[in-house]
Amino acid sequence: MSYFHHVSLLTSQQQENLTFYTEILGLRFVKNTVNQENTRMLHYYYGDYQGSPGSVITFFIVPHLGQRRDESQFLSEIGLNVPKHSLDFWQQRFEKFSVPVERTADQLIVQDPDQVTLIFNETNISTPERANIVKNDIPAEKQILGLAAINFQVADPVKTADFFEKLLGWTGDDNHIQLSPTEAITLTASDSLTKTRMGRGSIDHVAFAVESDEALELLREKARRQKWQIEKMISRGYFKSLYIREPGGNRVEFATVAPGFTIDEPLEHLGEQLALPPFLAAQRADIEKNLYPEK
């Protein structure tokens, strides 16, 4: 099981976002739904063919969203794993689509339409599992495998590291926590005292995978005993979520791997229409009527 579950961001550019993540990156549009806190707002999910935990990047579509200001605390630099011997392919693909790309020995660095930094990490994995291969023009042995890393920018990395160690037993050194051979967290000291302003390209939260509802409940009880800042636990339909603010101020979600995205539409037709989890289905007419108009 992947350590990462998903990462969620904000964008105002509905069509540019969809084009970049599906047509250029080759991810599948696995869920077209709404923000459950504000059902006027669309919520797009991209991932591998099944929308497997660990492969998913989501965006809240916020028309007329302002410019972000990354200051005192924020999440940044989303790492993505790709198969071995695939960096040349990705460099050529980005150049074909006129996406500026920076190359190092084993990484490519690009930015999405909202100036979100994406870092492509070459792995020793040769190809995705067959069930996760997206049907598009990208060869299977070059397709994105899933999330690799996230950077926590915080005033005091030691306090954030303490959070991960005490709650989850995750340890590291030099502000780096290696979760698995292909997944990691970086902790970076912020040098700004100015409050961060959420805007285009802001990362709202990163989610880590939890194997079951029971494990999630145990995690909540442990967080309560340790007196971490719990925001809420709630069912999102596709998974159950626990939200906690780590000491640096960033939102961290813990999400169950089940039931997944096929509870409201079949696997072969994911993302083809506006999907609503069962507890919102009765409100479909009102939700569709009141969606924010495109900018």
Image: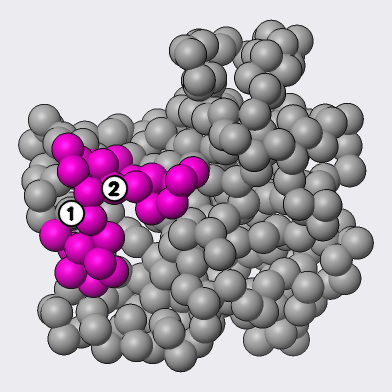
**The magenta segment:** 162-187
SS class, disc 2: strand
Nearest the viewer among 288 and 197 is 197
Label disc, if present, on residue 161 of the rendered structure: 1
Q: Which residue is mark 2?
A: 177
**Rendered-image quadrant of the C terminus:** top right
Q: Is residue 176 above or below residue 67?
A: below
Q: Are marks 2 and 1 in contact (CB under 8 Å)?
A: yes
**Relative to 98, is 45 above or below?**
below
Mark 1: secondary structure: helix
Picture coordinates of residue 166, whole percent (x, y):
18, 69
Q: Nearer the viewer, mark 2 or mark 1?
A: 2
Q: How is the model colour-coded?
A: one colour
Q: Indicate left or right for 122 with 187 as reference.
A: right
Q: Residue at x 64, y 39 (%)?
A: 125
Is residue 85 within the magenta segment? no
Please provide percent x and percent y for residue 85: 67, 22
Mark 2 vs 1, N-terminal side: 1
Pick whichever, 258 or 100, lies toward us. Answer: 258
Query: Given the image, on which type of amino acid does mark 2 rest?
Result: Ile
**Around disc 1, counting alpha carbons within 10 Å, would you say few (fewer than 14), some (14 to 19), or many (20 or more)?**
many
Q: Residue at x 8, y 36 (%)?
A: 193
User: Quick one: 139 or 155, which is closer to the camera?
Assistant: 139
